[in-house]
Amino acid sequence: MSSILAGLFGPHSDYKKLEKEIEGLGLLDSEYIVYLSDDHHNSQYLASVEIKNRDLTDKMRCIFDENHVHKTYLFENMSIDQASYSHLKRLIDARSKAEIHNSPDVRRKAQHDGMNSEVKA
């Protein structure tokens, strides 16, 4: 069964350019979806592509990176028919909540002996 590679793109990314590059790999418009809001000119968007082999996954990741993807998600054993926006959004939300985020560096003070006889008044 195929997999879905989904990417979240920022408002500065051109979805038309992304579509051309995806189709340039030989994918049909029935093998990918670009989810746009009503105001698609200055908003984020999500794109999903049906992946059938590992080579295509690597090529699509490169295309996503060239188009300034914020984050990518790979959903295995899913077809493009199952990749509705609401279903993907639920899966992405669940993965985001499960991620362990990096904590800031914690500074620890080393124990010291305090003042000693070397301190001059």
Image (cartoon, rainbow, N blue to C red):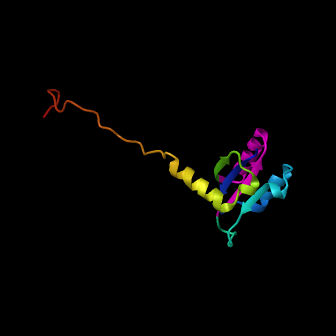
Residue 12 visible at all: no
The answer to whether 78 appears left or right of 108 in the picture is: right
Residue 24 visible at all: yes
The residue at 65%/49% (across/down) is 72
Q: Residue 56 in magenta?
A: yes
Where residue 98 sits: x, y (%)? 51, 48
The residue at 69%/72% (across/down) is 38
How many discs mark residues in the rendered view? 0
Q: Residue 10 in magenta?
A: no
Residue in the foreground of this view, choosing between 66 and 56: 56
Where residue 99 sits: x, y (%)? 52, 47
Where residue 107 sits: x, y (%)? 35, 40
The answer to whether 30 appears left or right of 115 in the picture is: right
Which residues are the magenta region?
44-69
Residue in the foreground of this view, choosing between 98 and 18: 98
Q: Is residue 8 above or below residue 62?
A: below
Q: The N terminus lies in which quarter of the figure?
A: top right
